[in-house]
Image: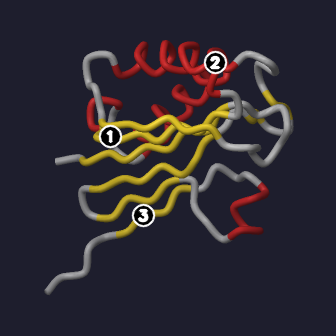
Amino acid sequence: MSQLERRNLSSGAMWEDIVGYSRAVKVGHTIEISGCTAIDGNKIRAVGDPYCQSIFILEKISAYLQELGATLDDVVRTRIYVTDISRWEEVGKAHGAFFGSVKPATVMVEVSALIHPEMMVEIEATAIVK
């Protein structure tokens, strides 16, 4: 049995070394993107705006996928965590803008908090490439 090639991708976020995780991992044909938030360096983008935070996050996910040889078309599942489910339509609209034709399996759940109080959305993704 052959060993599948593994590639870990780091975003350089301080939490990666503290917690012991990678931003993305590709093993064989599968790519897993860890939860992404609207952090840009040390600044939270679009404070108070879950739509804009979601757009920023999905752009980051797209860039990580490209770095690992995939595109948004390869995404088969997303997981969306929000701190205020009453604003689900704003987050859903952003998700639809990126995945309207792909239509991956997804879930959106409300959580009590994310790692920083100004973060309103966190999104994970799974992709399968040929």
Specify the farthest residue to the front.
86
> Which residue lies under the disc numbered 2?
87
Taking depth in this image into account, of 14 and 97 the one nearest to the observer is 97
Residue 119 x/y as whole percent: 76, 34
Task: Classify mark 2: helix, strand or loop.
Answer: helix
Question: How many other residues sit within 10 Å of disc 2, few (<14), some (14-19) or many (≥20)?
Answer: some
> Which residue lies under the disc numbered 1?
70
Counting residues from the start of the chain, the first of labels 1 and 2 encountered is 1
Kind of residue sitting beneath label 2: Arg
Residue 130 can be seen in this image:
yes
Residue 99 x/y as whole percent: 35, 22
Taking depth in this image into account, of 12 and 48 the one nearest to the observer is 48
Q: Which mark is residue 127?
A: none
Q: Which mark is residue 7?
A: 3
Taking depth in this image into account, of 85 and 21 the one nearest to the observer is 85
Q: In percent of the image, x 14 and y 86: which residue is there? A: 1
Is 114 displayed left or right of 25 in the figure?
A: right
Is 130 displayed left or right of 127 in the figure?
A: left
Q: Mark 1 and mark 2: span between their CA atoms?
A: 30 Å
Kind of residue sitting beneath label 1: Ala
Is 73 displayed left or right of 110 in the figure?
A: left
Front tag of 2 and 3: 2
